[in-house]
Image (cartoon, rainbow, N blue to C red):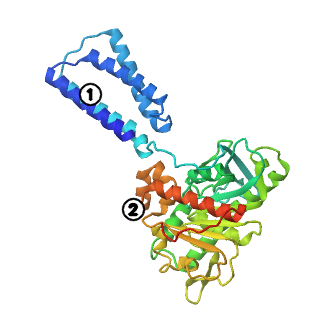
């Protein structure tokens, strides 16, 4: 939609400038009436399904409003102006640049249809900030307790209780990274809570307005860990332990807080949580933390790992300065979803030593590979911002983003239906 409107705008501006130059007139009155008409049409479009109002249209709305006001004032004053080709050209160039700038949000974050939701329940949301009084924030020097922001997706106006699912985002992600997945699950009778890990997330905002951006040192650690020759394997192991401790501490704190509130708070969404049925899932580093938690906690009944190494199942051996897979059995039901970016490393990167398909320590594990998918294809980002997704992952995925996310959401729902609700059988294909 943004691209189409931008081209229409640019064609109109250039054509009108050419028309003025050919006729040697400014056509001031016509232009002013058109400016006001365009603003009115834009407002009407925002009131219709054609343009869904959001932040992406704010700058364009302001620009059109200012041009409409300028046009109305000009018509009222009715002051004659002399035609000058240089003036027409200059004003046309400036307006073209202004419109391109105003359309940037709509181009970077294009209006897009939402992936389909198959459940019978309408979905409600709620956001909270939990403060962990047992931990001091390590990323600041203020001596404050660590806070964790969470958001719930749950069945609206529904009765009874539903399994609890806890999601952890990727290395630079945000809690909204897989919103389509949360909606699909909540619509089918789950209470989903997604966590922002402050200073690991790109951006998070708490209930009291406190903002936290990604920590620069952490950001540099992750970037360097993905490059050859920056860290030794022993140093990588130290980073993994540090990252996972923060992530799993956050997830444990959130889980314990929710379980406590589910016992004592007779308010939504806590009253709808079945505390005997718990699943965890996450993307990338969040997937690794979910697998880790699935080993540590006995109350977790199912885990979904989306494109992540099994950090909890790695053992660093100093004598060979490398990682090997743990020999301890992993008994929690596990579903792995891989993109090409990870699938192609399973047999070559020692960080994925425990992820190999022939690992006998996993007693109930399922694995699916989305052929042609990139790492971020397994999040909503390619839908929300194709440009950013392509930049961050280096290229465009060779797979349809909607088909990918809708199939992924369906598989995750079916896995949790099978493991937490005892519904049907779970028989995913190895490759999609």
Q: Which residue is drawn at 42% across and 46% down?
A: 108
Q: Earlier in the sequence, mark 1 or mark 2?
A: 1
Circle on res. 398:
2
Q: Position of residue 339 (x, y in %)?
A: 48, 66
What is the residue that sits farthest to the bottom in this orientation? 319
Left or right: 375 in relation to 359: left
- To which quarter of the image does residue 299 belong? bottom right
Q: Is residue 249 visible?
A: no
Between disc 1 and disc 2, the foreground one is 2
As drawn, 211 above or below 135: above
Spatial CA distance of label 1 from label 2 is 42 Å
What is the residue that sits farthest to the right in this orientation? 264
Q: Which residue is drawn at 66% across and 84% down?
A: 327
Disc 2 on helix, strand or loop? Answer: loop
Q: Tell me the residue that label 1 is attached to.
A: 91
- To which quarter of the image does residue 427 belong? bottom right
As drawn, 327 above or below 27: below
Disc 1 on helix, strand or loop? Answer: helix
């Amino acid at each position: 939609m943004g691209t189409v409107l931008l081209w229409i705008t640019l064609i109109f501006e250039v054509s009108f400038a050419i028309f003025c130059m050919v006729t040697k007139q400014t056509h001031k009155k016509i232009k002013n009436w058109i400016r006001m008409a365009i603003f009115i049409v834009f407002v009407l479009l925002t009131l219709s399904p054609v343009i869904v109002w959001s932040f992406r249209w704010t700058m364009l709305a302001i620009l059109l409003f200012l041009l409409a006001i300028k046009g109305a004032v000009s018509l009222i004053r009715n002051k004659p102006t002399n035609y000058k080709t240089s003036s027409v050209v200059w004003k046309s160039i400036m307006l073209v640049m202004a419109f391109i700038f105003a359309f940037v949000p709509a181009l970077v974050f294009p209006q897009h249809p939402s992936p389909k939701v198959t459940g019978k329940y309408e979905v409600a949301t709620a956001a909270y900030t939990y403060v962990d009084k047992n931990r001091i924030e390590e990323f600041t020097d203020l001596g404050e307790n660590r806070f964790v922001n969470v958001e719930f997706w749950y069945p609206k106006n529904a009765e009874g209780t539903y399994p609890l699912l806890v999601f952890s985002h990727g290395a630079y992600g945000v809690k909204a990274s897989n919103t389509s997945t949360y909606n699909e699950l909540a619509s089918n009778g789950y209470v989903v809570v997604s966590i922002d890990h402050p200073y690991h997330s790109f951006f998070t905002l708490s209930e009291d307005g406190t903002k936290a951006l990604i920590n620069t040192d952490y950001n540099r650690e992750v970037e360097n860990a993905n490059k050859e020759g920056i860290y030794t394997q022993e140093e990588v192991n130290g980073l993994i332990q540090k990252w996972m401790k923060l992530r799993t501490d956050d997830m444990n704190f959130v889980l314990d807080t929710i379980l406590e509130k589910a016992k004592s708070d007779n308010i939504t969404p806590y009253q709808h949580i079945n505390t005997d049925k718990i699943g965890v899932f996450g993307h990338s580093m969040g997937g690794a933390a979910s697998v880790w938690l699935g080993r540590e906690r006995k109350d977790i009944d199912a885990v979904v790992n989306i494109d992540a190494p099994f950090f909890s199942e790695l053992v660093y051996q100093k004598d060979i300065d490398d990682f090997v897979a743990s020999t301890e059995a992993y008994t929690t039901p596990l579903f792995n979803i891989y993109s090409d970016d990870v699938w192609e490393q399973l047999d070559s990167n020692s960080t994925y030593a425990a992820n190999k398909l022939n690992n006998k320590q996993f007693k109930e594990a399922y694995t699916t590979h989305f052929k042609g998918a990139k790492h971020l294809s397994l999040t909503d980002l390619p839908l929300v911002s194709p440009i950013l997704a392509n930049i961050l992952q280096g290229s465009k995925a060779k797979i349809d983003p909607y088909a990918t996310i809708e199939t992924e959401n369906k598989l995750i729902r079916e896995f949790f239906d099978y493991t937490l609700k005892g519904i049907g059988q779970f028989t995913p294909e190895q490759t999609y």
